[in-house]
Amino acid sequence: SLLVIGEGRAWYNDELLPGKDALAQSGLKPVTLGCKEGLALISGTPSVTAMAILALYNSMQAAKTADITGAMSLEVLKGTIKAFDPRPHALKKHEEQAKTARNVTRILEGSQIIDTYKDHRLQDALSLRCIPQVHGAIKRVLKDAAVSIENEMDSVSDNPLIFPEEEDGIALMAGNFDGSFVGIYADTISIALANLAKITERRIDRLVNHHLSELPNFLVVNPGLNSGYMIPQYTAAGLLNEIRVLSHPATIDNIPTCANQEDVISFAYFASKKAYRISKKLEYILAIELMTATQAMDFHLPLKPSPVTEGVYHLVRSEVPMVEEDRFFHPDIEAVYRQIHEGEIVKLVEMKIGEIEF
């Protein structure tokens, strides 16, 4: 903002210059601000909303992706599809739960693996069996948050507000700058994403633990000296720990400022900033689940996965080859993270089954 009006400093051709000089070197002139434009540049309220929008977008895409990664984990862990029968979900009056169950069954339709193991056990662990309940609850939070954030986008948040009334207008001092509507929902998004990260990390652990997965230890072809996907599970656990710390609500705190004139502070800026950071960390955890589920699929041959999960498998394998012995996993994680963040995974699945219900 300082640079826009010719103040502050900026880098130009590796030289740190006064703002006005940097603009001149770039062939630009400082902007002369009009009424309220200075406030628009420095106000915290629009930045709260902007970061919340980014967090919400990532979160809604992550929730859809989690239905895909969760379905793949259910498939390769020999989970029973019976837990996704529509009848139990019709008795729980949360539409997001029933929609999630339908998403999973649509994704897994035609899977030889699912059909072979549908009676393998009476019931699965909660990280598999409760996908509709947990994922559904998170979607409900995100939908509610979207309403509040969209309302804020359509609102006026400066102070004072000038109304074109009487001879010279009327200026009213009010508190529309307060960010509580968005901040409280940003905190709620953070808590919801922590729950999604929690259930996702538990599925990753089941995939790499041969005592639970009935697959080779750490999903490596040559176990023993090779640690396979043990280390990526460490990474997921570390990311989850960071998310748990960040999910502590910011808006419950308060530090008065301005000689106690501003005696109640929303802390919405930090709430939105945390939610955005959490949304990106969650995408990395989902990437690790997708990597491990893809690796596990190789051990089920000659049984075929569903046409949908097979398509996801080939998309992942276009970037990440099968792990036969240890290698540096960071490029693999980044490659799958990009596929998730850019929406490639969701787009591929929705091309095959239609829109993932939310």
Image (tube, rainbow, N blue to C red):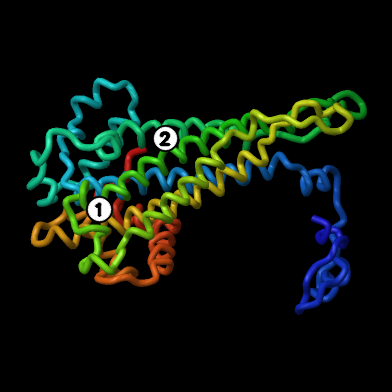
Instruction: Quarter of the image for the N terminus: give it.
Output: bottom right
Tell me if 181 is positioned left or right of 121 in this view.
right
Residue at the spot 64% in from the left edge and 31% down from the top edge: 251
* Cα–Cα gap, marks 2 and 1: 24 Å
Q: Position of residue 259 (x, y in %)?
A: 89, 30
Front disc: 2 or 1: 2
- Tell me the kind of residue under disc 1: Lys
**Does the image show residue 18?**
yes
Q: Which residue is the extreme one toward the bottom?
A: 13
- Tell me the kind of residue under disc 2: Ile
Q: Position of residue 281 (x, y in %)?
A: 49, 51
- Identify the residue under disc 2: 138
Tell me if 176 is positioned left or right of 288 in this view.
right
Other-residue count near label 1 (Cα within 10 Å), few / some / many at <14 / 14–19 / ≥20: few
Q: Which residue is the extreme one toward the right?
A: 167
Taking depth in this image into account, of 235 and 85 the one nearest to the observer is 235
**Does the image show residue 150?**
no
Residue at the spot 34% in from the left edge and 25% down from the top edge: 94
Instruction: Give the structural element (helix, strand or loop) at label 2.
Output: helix
Q: Is residue 77 above or below residue 92?
A: below
Q: Earlier in the sequence, mark 2 or mark 1?
A: 2
Q: In which quarter of the view is residue 300 placed? A: bottom left
Instruction: Quarter of the image for the C terminus: give it.
Output: top left
Q: Which residue is the extreme one toward the front?
A: 225
Tell me if 281 is positioned left or right of 124 in this view.
right
- Identify the residue under disc 1: 352
